[in-house]
C-alpha cells in the first residue's frame, strides 16, 4: 500500500456537507460524480496531499443508506492507493483478510476499487484503490 488515498465520509446531504467542508478546508470540491452501481453520489476535496470523499446515498438500498441508518453520518472508510490492485487482493487474501469483492470494480475518481470486510480490520472498512490507466 503506497499511501492513504482518501477518507470516505457518509453524509445525509451532499449539498449541505459541501458547504461545510468548503468552509472547513478553505477550498471547493474539485470533483462530483455519481457511481450508479453503488447507489452513491460523491464529492471530493483536496487539502494539501490529503483527500476527503463525501458520500450521499441515491437510493434506500445502497450501502451508504444502510450505513447512515445504522451509524449516522461519519467516517465510512479509509482508502489506500495501491500499484497493482489484483496482486494486493491476492496478498491480503493470503494474509487471511476477507475481501468483499475479489474482482475490482470501477469506483469514483477514475479508480478501480475493492473492499476488505471491517470484521477483519478492527471495524474499519478498508478500500483499495488503483488509478485506471
Image (spheres, rainbow, N blue to C red):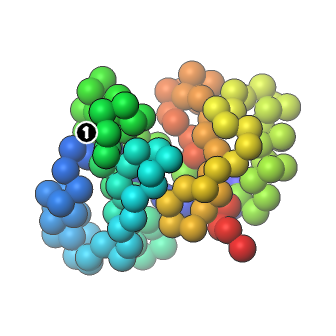
Q: Is residue 60 above or below residue 108?
A: above
Rendering coords of residue 41 (x, y %): 35, 55
Number of marks in the rendered image? 1
55 to 95, vertically: above or below? below
- State the quadrant of the N terminus: bottom right
Front residue of 62/29: it is 62
Q: Quadrant of residue 46?
A: bottom left
Q: In which quarter of the image is residue 27?
A: bottom left
Query: Could you tell me residue 97's position as x and y percent?
Result: 72, 29
Tell me which corner region of the image, top left, top right, bottom left or bottom right, holds residue 112: bottom right
Q: Where is residue 64 in the image (x, y as percent from the top left)?
A: 37, 38
Left or right relative to 91: residue 119: left
Q: Can residue 5 be seen in this view?
A: yes
Q: Which residue is drawn at 25% across and 39% down?
A: 73
> SS at mark 1?
loop
Q: Can residue 45 be seen in this view?
A: no
Tell me the residue at 83%/40% (across/down). Answer: 90
Task: Assign the C terminus to one quadrant of the image.
Answer: bottom right
| Residue at the image point whose x is 40% and y is 45% from the top | 39
Residue tagged by mark 1? Answer: 73
**Residue 128 locus on image (x, y percent):** 64, 50
In this picture, residue 101 sits left or right of residue 70: right
Q: Count residues near mark 1 (Cα–Cα under 10 Å), then give few for <14, some for 14-19, many for 20+.
A: some
Amino acid at each position: 500500500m503506497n499511501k492513504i488515498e482518501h477518507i470516505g465520509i457518509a453524509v445525509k446531504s451532499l449539498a449541505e456537507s459541501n458547504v461545510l467542508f468548503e468552509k472547513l478546508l478553505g477550498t471547493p470540491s474539485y470533483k462530483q460524480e455519481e457511481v450508479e452501481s453503488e447507489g452513491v453520489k460523491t464529492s471530493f476535496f483536496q487539502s494539501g496531499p490529503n483527500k476527503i470523499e463525501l458520500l450521499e446515498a441515491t437510493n434506500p438500498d445502497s450501502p451508504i443508506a444502510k450505513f447512515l441508518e445504522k451509524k449516522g453520518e461519519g467516517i465510512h472508510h479509509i482508502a489506500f492507493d495501491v500499484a497493482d490492485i489484483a496482486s494486493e487482493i491476492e496478498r491480503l487474501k493470503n494474509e487471511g483478510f476477507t475481501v468483499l469483492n475479489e474482482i475490482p470494480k470501477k469506483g469514483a475518481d477514475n479508480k478501480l476499487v475493492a473492499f476488505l470486510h471491517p470484521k477483519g480490520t478492527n471495524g474499519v472498512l478498508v478500500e483499495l484503490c488503483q488509478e485506471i490507466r
